[in-house]
Amino acid sequence: MTATIVTFGISKGGCSKSTSSGITSYLLSQEERVLAIDMDGQGNLTSFLTGEYDICNVFEEKTVLEAIIEGDARPYIIRIQENLDLIPSNDFLATLPRHMYSKGLKLNALQKTLEPVMKDYDWIIIDTPPSLSEQTILPLSTYSEGGSHVVIMFDGSMFAYYAIPKFIEMVEGAKERYNPNLNTAGILFSLIDSRAKENEVMLESIEEDHPNLKFDTIIKRKASTRRLPIAGFDGNPELKNALEYYIPFVKELKERVEQKQPQG
């Protein structure tokens, strides 16, 4: 069986894509084999999982950019802990469109890059940038027999609200042209301020505009979760508190992936 792919995305920053993909990768790796891929040149997922913040120097020519150019992920996979690996990123990922053009690579380039390792993992979790670019389109276009799924992040803001239909349109385009196995797993609320009065209005609007897409789980921002990139997972006395809302989300994600619903 090939890996199940889950891509976290939305064309707006600050919606917890990197945090959610990192924590999801960690939680899934407690029982299954996981490969996390950082497709955002900011490298937040890379820093989150490795503790390295000088990513341009530490991971110079050792990133997903080089993996895609060479068409082989294997030399660029690093071990984070048992059952959890990472293909890192750094600022030079911004040059990806130029390299794709010069080498004649198509939007299935990431799929070809991952083919040698598809059977080595149960899950491939992909973090994407807050833009409608090749760095987002490539993950959406990556086919796997084990299924390809999208988690659309939503922070409760009006900006993210209007970004959702644009992102769904991109998902549908990738599904039609490159990845017939692509499925929208759902919209995950990661609220900046869980006390904000407008949250209820936004919840109702999403349910009305996109029936059955909203995850039942709502991620409420917590200080202990924000401190995870500093404290890490191992030996962190706040870990249980930091993961409180993500544990039920990952359970719900697995259920939706197994049911292959909703379809978007």
Image (cartoon, grey):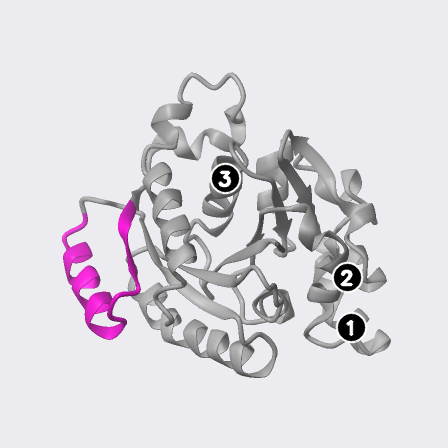
Look at 77% across and 38% down and name the residue there.
58
Residue topped by disc 1: 100
Asked whether residue 160 is drawn in magenta, I would say no
Crowding near the residue tagged with mark 2, few <14, some 14–19, many ≥20 C-alpha atoms within 10 Å: many
Q: Position of residue 141 (x, y in %)?
A: 60, 71
Q: Position of residue 258 (x, y in %)?
A: 42, 55
Q: Position of residue 7 (x, y in %)?
A: 52, 58
Asked if marks 2 and 1 touch (Cβ < 8 Å), the reply is yes
Q: Amino acid at mark 1?
A: Met
State which tag comes first along the sequence, 3 or 2.
3
State which tag comes first along the sequence, 3 or 1.
3
Q: Where residue 68 is drawn, which disc sits there?
A: 2
State which tag comes first along the sequence, 2 or 1.
2
Q: Amino acid at mark 2?
A: Ile
Chain part drawn in magenta: 196-218
Quarter of the rendering occupied by the N terminus: bottom right
Pair 3/2: label in front: 3
Look at 63% across and 50% down and name the residue there.
37
Q: Position of residue 90 (x, y in %)?
A: 70, 50
Identify the residue at the far front of this view: 1
Q: Where residue 28 is drawn, which disc sits there?
A: 3
